[in-house]
Image (cartoon, rainbow, N blue to C red):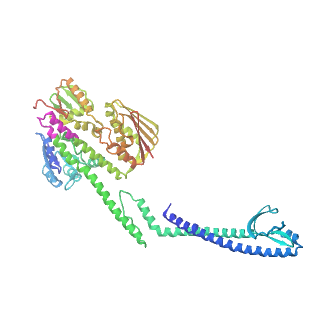
Amino acid sequence: MRLIRKSNIYSLLLIYVVIIAMIGFALYGIMTYFISNDHNEKLYNRKEYVLKQLLKSDSLLKYQHLSGNNVSIKEIPTGPLRREKITDTLIFDNIENKFFAYRQLAFSKMVNHHHYFIEVRKSLTEVQSIVKGTIIIMFLIVIIVFGVTFYLNEWIAKQIWQPVYLILNKMKNLPVKKLDRIILPETNVQEFNDMIHLMNQMIDQMKEDFNNLKNFVENTSHEVQTPLAVIKSKLELLLQSENFNPEQYKLVDTCYQSVHSLSKLSEALGLLSKIENGQFADEETVVDLNKLIDFKLGNYEELIKIKEIQIKKVVLTPIKLIRMNSTLADILIENIINNAIKHNYHGGEIAIEVNNDRIRFINTGNVLTSIPTSLFERFRKENSKSLGLGLSIVREITNKSNMGIAYHYEHQSHEISLTIK
Amino acid sequence: MKILIIEDERELIDSIISYLKSEKVECDYSYNIENAKIKLAESNYDLCLVDIGLPDGSGLELIVHIKWRCPNTGIIILSAKNSIENKVEGLNFGADDYLTKPFDLSELNARVNSVLRRRGIVRENEMRFNEIKIVMDNHQVFVKEQNVNLTKKEFELLIYFITNRNKVITKQALVSHLWKDYSDTVESFDFVYGQIKNLRKKLQIGGCRSYIQNINGVGYRFLDYEVN
């Protein structure tokens, strides 16, 4: 729900439901009070009239007949006089076949030594109609006024809040790669102007931070290579010494291997952050992943042969083409296949199943010791010789290229499935 | 044969010179582009090793200069950047090869020889090493004039060994040389071991002496007995 509508609904609900309901109740109370007073007065008048008729005593029955439900007179045994009592009651009407509300005044009177019990009534139908009508009119007024004010409020708020929506829209479409300042005309609201100003300050800061980070990662991943090249070359020269004992050879070799890993590590981290920073987002082309898989398998042919791995590739339905950066596609497939070979055992198997928007890579391998879902995390490795960045790179690429990736492990078979969205 | 090294890391220059230098190879160096241009004007070089990140500009700029002033000079880029884009860019500028830091000196030596051969600066079609004769054109290997059938990888391995003869070559350098970018899959060095075993066997069948030495699990050396 948008902010405007929410505040509108709250304020209107408060005004209309609470206040108007209160006014409505008050109005109802006052109206019924006056009407019922009026009724009671009329009942007393009627009582006087009936009594007068009774004293004349001749036309009592006739009168009762003519007055319908309005008067009933019964002779009752002599006794103490009953007290006057006003009540509301329902009386069944034979003609209309339903109940009608009446107000009645009951009392008894001794006339000519006869004890009469008399009820005089007045129909409440008109009162109910008046109340009903008033309520309907009030409801209509409330609904109309509610609707009009609702839309009016919303319209006014929209006009006032427009700069906020413009800022929001700009922020939504703000690409991480090239952060641009939000350019909006000055508004006449101090808060909005401040907000735009602050927003732009933040964007500048973010831009600077982003560039710093990017440069830092790029620089370190490159600049570290030259000192490593020096170390590596010196170690290689050291190896040429004639009189080394096995222990010394071992020391040099360990250093040499570590230099190699460090170089690979820094390269992989550099690549990972380049992907994360969206530096490959441009230059998308249509990529046929199936062809790419065949190409990569060709590159690995020799290694696959040496490790005596069986490749079983089936294409159930032709692959759906995807738009993505070709370098990323290359790295993606490379890493997945590399992974399937690296973590396979001698004489193992790799099954690849292409099915429209889904590619499954299933490879045999050793028992998994870590939690499957954690495999995509950085530096999560099953094998101490690997860097533990291959699958993080894979996940990062799928995140950036509108693909899904899942890992499944069962009975020493590792499955990576790639989904094109 | 003269090689000019343009690189701002002096220690790296020292290493390269001490590895490449021999009676046949003369090395010269420069720390920046300006000095390199002067050196290029003063004498003829067969090959330039060019670093991309130089203090007074990009090595790519120097490559353009070399291509223009000395078109017959071979160029190998030494760069810290390993992306495909960087490699393609460097080669498009006219470099013959692209080597990523940190490289193995043995690999650098192999690349230098390969570029010199490709450019016709070294015109030997035959490579001789005692009783081994290699015909480069059709990839044939003879031991005592007897043809020995080698696979592509074994052939590459033999060339690499002979090019870097008498030097200790690390296992990692061999793996990287044989499998290039795919070398990281080779988590064990067993594969190289297998290739070397086969090569050794094939050469020995032809009556060749055993030149390949295993150096304490660090690597291998193709040792020329007659020199020592």
Q: Is residue A40 above or below residue B213?
A: below
User: Any magenta on residue A239?
Assistant: yes
Q: Please tell me in which quadrant of the rendered image residue B202 appears.
A: top left
The quarter of the picture where the N terminus of chain B appears is: top left
Quadrant placement of the C terminus of chain B: top left
Residue A128 placement, left or right of A160: right
Q: Residue furthest right?
A: A58
Q: Would residue A71 be seen by someone viewing this image from the given angle?
A: no
Residue A218 position (above or below residue A73): above
Left or right position of A99 against A172:
right
Q: Is residue B3 magenta?
A: no
x and y percent of residue B111 in the render? Answer: 21, 41
Is residue A240 visible to the viewer in this orientation of the structure?
A: yes
Rendered image quadrant of residue B18:
top left
Quarter of image, res B57: bottom left
Q: Position of residue B34 (x, y in %)?
A: 16, 55
Q: Horizontal placement of A136 versus A292: left or right?
A: right
| Residue at x-position 22% and y-position 40% | A257
Where residue A261 sits in the image (x, y, percent)? 25, 42
Overall secondary structure of the magenta section = helix
Question: Taking A126 as reference, is A234 above or below it?
Answer: above
Q: Looking at the image, which residue is at 77% across and 74% down?
A: A44
The tally of labels here is 0
Q: Is residue B28 above or below residue A103?
A: above
Q: Residue at x 38, y 38 (%)?
A: A294
Q: Position of residue B97 (x, y in %)?
A: 24, 44
> Where does the magenta region start and end?
A236-257
